[in-house]
Image (tube, rainbow, N blue to C red):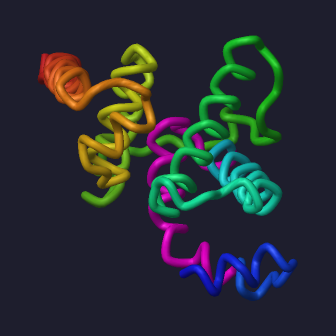
């Protein structure tokens, strides 16, 4: 890992690709769950990759690289959420162009609807709870890593994850 980091700091793009590749799926999962939009998630990941490349000289290894990179992805995702909330455009896709899922659609299509319900429920959570549960459930970070990200202790993180799960269960409960 340190050799890859050194090569990246020397401007080696191939080393950067090798460094990032094992974490791209994590980045995609985190961005997609936070943003509930494919294009925005792609934009967040691109921003995170640029920020990671630019900030590699600042990476001191105090946290694992995966933890540091995921934090950058989270920050990029929340930047897009803030732009969205301010009314600034975040994508070029017209949501009215998305086809409806019919009642005769295959079961996989209905799972997409379920995934959309989950994303909507996640989006309705307060930011601190959403971040904690996304990192735990989708980012597969430990409570200690989440605590480090959020700048709080492990017990408050456990509480946030628990409260987020309870709110998600309540929101997703069948009517």
Q: Of all residues shown, which one is farthest toward the right?
A: 11
Q: Between residues 149 and 105, which one lies in front from this camera angle? A: 149
Q: Residue at x 35, y 39 (%)?
A: 146
Q: Residue at x 63, y 86 (%)?
A: 3
Q: Between residues 70 and 68, which one lies in front from this camera angle? A: 68
User: Residue 93 location in percent, x, y?
Assistant: 76, 41
What is the magenta segment's predominant secondary structure? Answer: helix
Q: Does residue 104 appear in this view?
A: no
Q: Between residues 80 and 172, which one lies in front from this camera angle? A: 80
Q: Residue at x 54, y 61 (%)?
A: 61
Q: Residue at x 67, y 14 (%)?
A: 85
Quadrant of residue 60 within the rendered picture = bottom right
Highlighted magenta segment, given as a residue range: 17-39
Say which quadrant the N terminus sits in: bottom right
Look at the picture and state if 164 lies above or below 112: above
Say which quadrant the C terminus sits in: top left
């Amino acid at each position: 890992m340190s050799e890859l980091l050194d090569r990246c700091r020397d401007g080696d793009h191939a080393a950067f690709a090798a460094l990032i590749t094992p974490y791209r799926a994590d980045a995609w999962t985190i961005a997609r769950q936070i943003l509930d939009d494919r294009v925005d998630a792609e934009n967040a990941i691109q921003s995170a990759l640029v920020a990671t490349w630019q900030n590699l000289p600042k990476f001191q290894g105090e946290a694992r690289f995966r933890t540091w990179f995921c934090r950058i992805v989270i920050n990029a995702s929340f930047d897009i959420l803030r732009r969205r909330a301010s009314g600034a455009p975040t994508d070029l896709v017209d949501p009215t162009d998305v086809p409806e899922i019919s009642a005769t659609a295959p079961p996989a299509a209905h799972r997409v609807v379920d995934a959309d319900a989950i994303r909507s429920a996640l989006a309705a959570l307060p930011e601190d709870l959403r971040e904690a549960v996304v990192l735990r459930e989708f980012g597969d970070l430990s409570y200690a890593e989440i605590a480090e990200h959020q700048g709080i202790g492990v017990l408050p993180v456990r509480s946030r994850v628990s409260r987020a799960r309870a709110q998600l269960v309540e929101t997703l409960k069948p009517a």
